Image (spheres, helix red, strand yellow):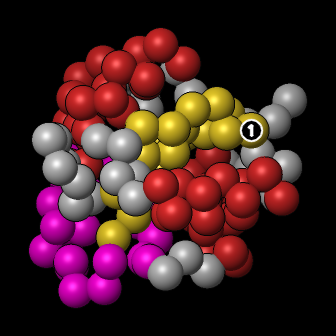
Amino acid sequence: MANRILIVDDAAFMRMMIRDILSKNGFEVVGEAQDGAQAIEKFKELRPDLVTMDITMPEMDGIVALKEIKKLDPSAKVIMCSAMGQQAMVIDAIQAGAKDFIVKPFQTDRVIEAINKTLGV
């Protein structure tokens, strides 16, 4: 069975890029969210195997959403997505429970490597 993934990013273009990479590599994208608040609701509803989470988003950023998701499910697997130059935020995310991070612009090999490592594939 394909691993079920929730994509969270405020940019529709970035969600489309990740969805494309995942679909071509045999993963099932079960949902998308455009901010942290939506991510929490979708996580509760869909219970994905993994979440890709943008760090910088309006309404609620990815680190706050990550902490909330970890409260709901301490074993939740979340990979943070960041732009270059966000090292401090990446460190905060890892300390908050993120399993890995990928840097934009996305490189297919790195995305798949991070997901497989996090899922233990």
Front in this rendered view, residue 37 or 51 = 37
Front in this rendered view, residue 113 or 111 = 111
Q: In which quarter of the image is the N terminus?
A: top right
Q: In this view, does 66 lie above or below 18?
A: above
- 42 horizontally vs 82: left or right: right
Q: Which residue lies furthest to the top in this view?
A: 45
Q: Looking at the image, which residue is at 41% across and 15% down?
A: 44
Q: In this view, does 101 lie above or below 63?
A: below
**Mark 1 crowdedness (10 Å alpha carbons): few <14, some 14-19, many ≥20:** some
Q: Is residue 2 above or below residue 58?
A: above
The stretch drawn in magenta includes residue 101: yes
Q: Residue furthest bottom?
A: 85
Count of labels in the image: 1
Q: Looking at the image, which residue is at 24% across and 30% down?
A: 37
Q: Looking at the image, which residue is at 13% across and 74% down?
A: 88
Q: Where is residue 101 in the image (x, y as percent from the top left)?
A: 41, 66
Q: Position of residue 112 (x, y in %)?
A: 68, 65
Residue 23 seen in the figure: yes
Quadrant of the rendered image containing residue 75 = top left
The stretch drawn in magenta includes residue 12: no
Residue 78 seen in the figure: no
Q: Residue furthest front?
A: 12
Q: What residue type is labelled 1?
A: Glu
Q: Where is residue 79 in the image (x, y as percent from the top left)?
A: 44, 54
Query: Which stretch is magenta?
Result: 83-104
Q: Looking at the image, which residue is at 60% across and 57% down?
A: 16
The residue under label 1 is: 28
- 68 horizontally vs 24: left or right: left
Front in this rendered view, residue 4 or 33 = 33
